[in-house]
């Protein structure tokens, strides 16, 4: 467990305060603070509530919100994404070896399709690979077509199901033809 804490600390320190370039400019990647939880809850609700309602018949309530935020805060690495100091998204990762688990990558709709999510995902993959994770996995609700297309277009393959969600994975091991 101490090894896991060390990995998480190194990942958050490497990504924390990181100025990340993307095709339309740059964003700041910072460790999530207590003050960030309000915007995180609002964004999560904005993006997830319609998917939960249409896909599973769930309605957003305080119990669900608390469970989702508790799960988020258990992740060793939780980072916010800021553009011109404004909150525009967040991500959470558990870089356990040999398999990193991407818990969340959420970007405000007004900032989507600009390359930010791709740049953040690439950074997380590089950092996880640097920590000797051999692959990265994530789960996506099966009715979240936008997220499924996003990950598949970036090399993630279907790996079955994780409960009711689609499980996607990507190898982080460099192939000889990639070098």
Image (cartoon, rainbow, N blue to C red):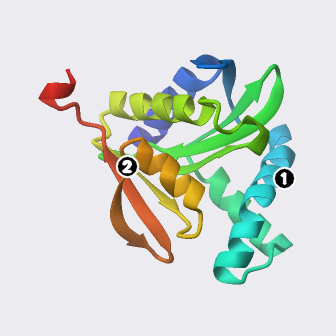
* Nearer mark to the viewer, of 2 and 1: 2
Separation of residues labelled 2 and 1 (CA atoms): 28 Å
Label 1: state its secondary structure.
helix
Q: Does residue 88 sit above or below 85 in this rendering?
A: below
Label 2 crowding class (10 Å Cα cut-off): few <14, some 14-19, many 20+? some
Question: Looking at the picture, how far across and down is residue 152, in whole percent?
Answer: 42, 50
Residue drawn 43% across the image and 29% down it: 127
Question: Looking at the picture, how far across and down is residue 108, in whole percent?
Answer: 76, 42
Residue beneath disc 1: 42
Residue drawn 52% across the image and 21% down it: 14
Residue drawn 53% across the image and 69% down it: 142
Question: Looking at the picture, how far across and down is residue 179, in whole percent?
Answer: 20, 20
Q: Which mark is residue 157?
A: none
Q: Residue furthest left?
A: 176
Label 1 crowding class (10 Å Cα cut-off): few <14, some 14-19, many 20+? few
Question: Looking at the picture, how far across and down is residue 87, in whole percent?
Answer: 80, 33
């Amino acid at each position: 467990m101490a090894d896991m804490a060390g990995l998480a600390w190194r990942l958050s320190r490497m990504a924390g305060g990181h100025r990340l370039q993307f095709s339309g400019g740059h964003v700041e990647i910072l460790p999530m603070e207590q003050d960030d939880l309000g915007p995180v809850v609002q964004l999560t609700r904005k993006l997830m509530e319609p998917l939960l309602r249409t896909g599973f018949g769930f309605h957003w309530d305080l119990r669900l919100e608390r469970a989702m935020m508790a799960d988020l805060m258990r992740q060793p690495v939780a980072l916010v994404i800021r553009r011109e100091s404004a909150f525009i998204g967040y991500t959470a990762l558990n870089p356990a070896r040999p398999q990193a688990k991407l818990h969340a990558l959420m970007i405000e709709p007004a900032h989507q399709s600009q390359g930010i999510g791709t740049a953040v995902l690439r950074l997380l993959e590089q950092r996880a690979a640097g920590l000797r994770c051999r692959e990265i996995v994530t789960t996506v609700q099966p009715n979240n077509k936008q997220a499924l297309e996003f990950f598949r277009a970036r090399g993630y393959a279907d790996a079955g199901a994780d409960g009711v969600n689609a499980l996607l994975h990507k190898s982080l091991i460099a192939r000889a033809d990639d070098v």
